[in-house]
Amino acid sequence: MSPCTNAWKGQLAASCRTRRMPAPCLRHLLLIAWGMPVRQGIKAHRCIVTIHLLRAVILAGAVAGSLAVYFLFSLYILPQSYQESVRPLRPEPVITSVKFSASYITLGDSVVIFVSGTNNGEKADMQIVSVGFPNLTSSDAVRIIQHDFRQQPERIEPGDQVGAGYQGTENLVAAQHPSIEAFSWPWEAGSRYSIQLQVEPPAEGLFVIFVKSVALPHSWNGAHYPQEGTMDYQREFVDEYFVVVANP
């Protein structure tokens, strides 16, 4: 029998006398040593289960949040932004000023014309300020003194193909008289541009000037100025101005 056999019977183990450890104490320690790994394993399992549950809850919350954001965008934000993107803009051109250096001149003299316009609506892809001269046969008698439009003004000569009925190039007609067409592309909302011209009337009598402004595309009834009055050969409204030309 080994020296420590009696330790399980409550007697002092022979080999343990040097440490003065009673046999019941040794048995208790062995039982603790055997039981601790089991209890620690149970606790560790419980911790792992808790961590997995927390992860599942967090994942479920993230999925629910993502779905909520998706439905918010798909049902409200995206349809609203799409409607805004497809809705035609509504520019509102206005001629803000038309001034003449003189309303009465003698034949051989020139008159200076100042015209300015703005956009009181939304952004226009392009907006035109047109100054027409029904008494002229060529734009050679017109000199562009200055302008601040984004693009270089164009000279329209009789016979040139121009848009009509506020439809741009979709409806073309032949020009019947010369004009100067100043435009900005694009024309931002609230922006103002002006042009100054000098013209020498060719004959005595009433020298007629047509002024108008058109935004393109013509998306609504307010996209031209004026809204009523005389119609030119393009079937578009114009404001009429007159300068009296007398014999010297």
Image (cartoon, grey):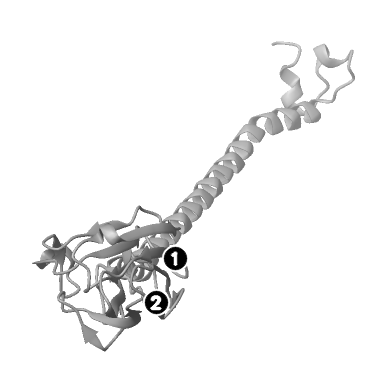
Looking at the picture, how far across and down is residue 121, in whole percent? 40, 75
Q: Give the numbered dot on residue 132.
A: none
Q: Which residue in the protein does label 2 denote?
A: 105
Looking at the picture, how far across and down is residue 59, in whole percent? 46, 52
In the image as oriented, which residue stretches furthest toward the bottom? 229
- First in sequence: mark 2 vs mark 1: 2
| Residue 64 showing in the rendered view | yes
Residue type at mark 1: give it. Ser
68 and 92: which is toward the camera: 92
Looking at the picture, how far across and down is residue 6, in whole percent? 75, 20
Query: In percent of the image, x 30 and y 69: which residue is there?
Result: 130
> For numbered disc 1, what is the local secondary structure?
strand
Q: Are marks 2 and 1 in contact (CB under 8 Å)?
A: no
231 and 186: which is toward the camera: 231
On screen, residue 89 versus residue 169, left or right, reads right
Q: Which residue in the protein does label 1 denote?
A: 194
Considering only vertical position in the picture, is 95 above or below 199? below
Mark 1 residue crowding within 10 angstroms, few (<14) / some (14–19) / many (20+):
many
Separation of residues labelled 2 and 1 (CA atoms): 24 Å
Query: In percent of the image, x 42 and y 62: which residue is there?
Result: 69
Query: In percent of the image, x 15 and y 71: which residue is there?
Result: 164
Tag nearer the camera, 2 or 1: 2
| Residue 125 showing in the rendered view | no
230 and 120: which is toward the camera: 230
Residue type at mark 2: give it. Ile
